[in-house]
Amino acid sequence: MGWVYAFFKCADKSFKGFSQLEKLKALEDKFSLDDFLAKEDLPSEIPASLPDSEDEQERISRYNQVKEQLLQQILPFCICSEYFQAGANNHLTTEYLTHALQAADLALTSTQESLEQVLEQNHTDYDTAKATALVVRYAIAKGFLKLKSPADSLVKNIFMICPVRNLTDKENEYLQGYIAEQEAKGHKVHYPPRDTDQDDPIGLNICMQNREAIQDADEVHIYWNPASSGSNFDFGMTFMVYKPIKFINKDHVPKTPHKSFQNVLHALDELYALD
């Protein structure tokens, strides 16, 4: 679901160690999806326009099937103990939101055939579109959804992983030029040598500041120097929260013939293929 950008914050950390299915079911209870769908302005079953001839047991079975589909498709596939993120890099746009809410309204008042005509150009199906629209409504109503306009979605928050204490003049020159290029495009760049308070004899405050900046980032760009121990820590946090990664000095860090951290960085860079 690459067009969705949402964070589901969970105060309860007991999800750690649970399977994905267990977490999905726990989320369903936590966010009271049934209570939301039971509101007067929403149907008690999905879909609402099933033929009257279908018996109650079939209706319940069909509802549960579609609801399970809703949970599997809309709730994030990238799950960690505190944050739930759908869509690694993209944003839910106003254009999609408008379509989703229109689909929900049509689904509540129209026949399946008329809704299928409306959705035909989007190459989707009735149940999926309706489930999507309902969960979008739910996320907005509960305040879980962070909505960005198409224009806003072009602006990225970028966190830089790079050497700090042992930064060479050559590395600094390269990074300054790279950051200037990103900021000229309108992106916001968190550059630790500049934006993280380095006056920290222990290093814990630096780790905490970088953790927050990584969590807020849309992308993490890595200038890799194996001598930088702080970069290892920042990479671990980046990987934990499923942030898209761009390996900016990959041309100077060759792949190895066997397993290596360099190969992991190259693989992630190829996986996300960021501009």
Image (cartoon, rainbow, N blue to C red):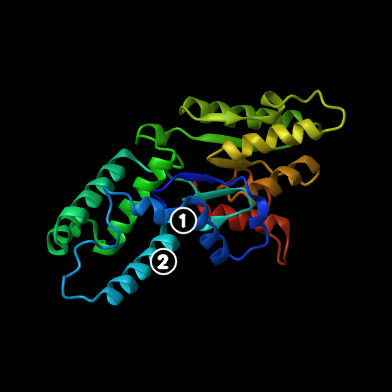
Q: Which mark is residue 145?
A: none
Is residue 1 at least partly visible in the picture? no
Q: Residue at x 23, y 61 (%)?
A: 48
Rounded to the nearest angstrom, the CA distance separating label 2 from label 1 is: 10 Å
In this image, 90 relative to 209: left or right? Answer: left
- State the residue in front, 156 or 180: 156
Q: Which residue is mark 2?
A: 68
Q: Residue at x 41, y 66 (%)?
A: 68
Is residue 165 at least partly visible in the picture? yes
Residue type at mark 2 is Glu
Q: Which residue is mark 1?
A: 75
Residue type at mark 1 is Leu
Query: SS at mark 1?
Result: loop
In which quadrant will I find the N terminus?
A: bottom left
In the image, is residue 237 above or below residue 260?
A: above
In this image, 264 relative to 106: left or right? Answer: right
